[in-house]
């Protein structure tokens, strides 16, 4: 089945230096799907959304971009969000090493072209 998706935002993964992102950087490839995990009990931000790859937390959606994804995840609509690696730059500063894209997917195949 061919699913369509609509671009929502793109950003660098926040907090990579504090999580496992730097340890798997050389394994990440553009186009790779990442998972999103809401963290409503996060003491720093109730809208925190972690970005994970193969069970490892890479970092977070930046605070200025996380409100909509946090709400969708909180209401059980995680199946409409897709997060993909857009760019990996191992030589960049930690907070600019991985750029990801956030997309809204149309699983029904009935969306606009």
Image (cartoon, helix red, strand yellow):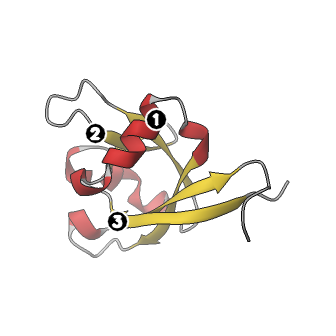
In the rendered structure, find residue 58 and report the number of the disc placed on it.
Answer: none
Mark 1 vs mark 3, foreground winner is 1
Name which of mark 3 and mark 2 comes first in the sequence: 3
Q: Label 3 belongs to which residue?
A: 11
At a point 73% along the width and 59% down the height, the residue shown is 111
Separation of residues labelled 3 and 2 (CA atoms): 15 Å
Q: Label 2 belongs to which residue?
A: 48
| Place of residue 24 in the rendered image (x, y in percent of width and height, measured from the top left) | 41, 53
The answer to whether any part of residue 65 appears in the image is yes
| Closer-to-camera residue (109/21) | 109
Question: How many marks do you count on the picture?
Answer: 3
Give the quadrant of the C terminus: bottom right
Q: Residues within 10 Å of mark 3 (few under 14, many from 20)?
A: some
In the rendered structure, find residue 73 and report the number of the disc placed on it.
Answer: 1
User: Would residue 8 be found to the left or right of residue 94 on screen?
Assistant: right
At a point 20% along the width and 45% down the height, the residue shown is 18
| Place of residue 88 in the rendered image (x, y in percent of width and height, measured from the top left) | 41, 70
Residue 111 in the image: above or below residue 55? below
Separation of residues labelled 1 and 2 (CA atoms): 11 Å
Q: Residues within 10 Å of mark 1 (few under 14, many from 20)?
A: many
| Closer-to-camera residue (27/42) | 42
User: Would residue 97 be found to the left or right of residue 80 on screen?
Assistant: left
Mark 1 vs mark 2, foreground winner is 1
Element marked by disc 2: loop
User: Would residue 76 be found to the left or right of residue 107 on screen?
Assistant: left
At a point 48% along the width and 29% down the height, the residue shown is 75
Q: Are marks 3 and 2 in contact (CB under 8 Å)?
A: no
Name which of mark 1 and mark 2 comes first in the sequence: 2
């Amino acid at each position: 089945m061919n699913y369509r998706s609509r671009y929502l935002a793109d950003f660098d993964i926040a907090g990579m230096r504090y999580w496992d992102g730097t340890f798997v950087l050389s394994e990440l490839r553009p186009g790779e799907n990442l998972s999103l995990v809401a963290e409503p009990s996060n003491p720093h931000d109730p809208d925190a959304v972690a970005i994970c790859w193969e069970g490892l937390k890479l970092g977070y959606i930046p605070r200025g971009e996380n409100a909509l994804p946090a709400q969708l995840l909180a209401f059980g609509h995680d199946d409409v969000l897709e997060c993909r690696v857009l760019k990996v730059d191992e030589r960049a500063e930690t907070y600019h090493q991985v750029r990801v894209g956030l997309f809204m997917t149309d699983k029904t195949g009935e969306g606009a072209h």
